[in-house]
Image (cartoon, rainbow, N blue to C red):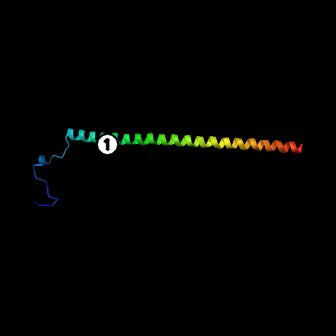
Amino acid sequence: MNDDPTKKLPDDETQYNTKPTITTVLERLNEIGDSLRAEIETLRVGQEQLRVDLTAEIQSLRSEMNQRFADVDKQFVLLNKKFRMHTEEVM
């Protein structure tokens, strides 16, 4: 047997049928479909985890903002009292 790849195949090329059959094509399409379904499911799980994480982060930020607003309100009340005291002293 000669390993030279430039040699022509034998005259009986029917024994080298490389055209895929419909079954082969359908099997490959099913494999691709299964792979895509698995990737989509992975994305769905990741998306759900991201939604949960973002919801928790938003809730945390809301809580922090509410606390800071409450602190600002307290400071405003104190400032208002001091302002009134100084106004009464001046008058």
Q: Residue at x 60, y 43 (%)?
A: 64
Of residues 12 and 65, the one nearer the viewer is 65
Picture coordinates of residue 54, whole percent (x, y): 51, 42
Of residues 58 and 36, the one nearer the viewer is 58
Say what secondary structure mark 1 lies in.
helix
The amino acid type, in three-letter code, at marker 1 is: Ser
Say which residue label 1 marks. Answer: 35
Indicate the quadrant where residue 31 lies: top left
User: Would you place residue 8 above or below residue 82 in this image?
Assistant: below
- Callout 1: 10 Å neighbours few (<14), some, many (20+)? few
Q: Residue at x 14, y 58 (%)?
A: 7
Q: Quadrant of the N terminus?
A: bottom left
The answer to whether residue 19 is left or right of residue 43 is: left
How many marks overall?
1
Indicate the quadrant where residue 29 lies: top left
Q: Residue at x 12, y 46 (%)?
A: 14
The answer to whether residue 40 is left or right of residue 26 is: right
Picture coordinates of residue 91, whole percent (x, y): 89, 42
Picture coordinates of residue 88, whole percent (x, y): 86, 42
The answer to whether residue 83 is left or right of residue 1 is: right
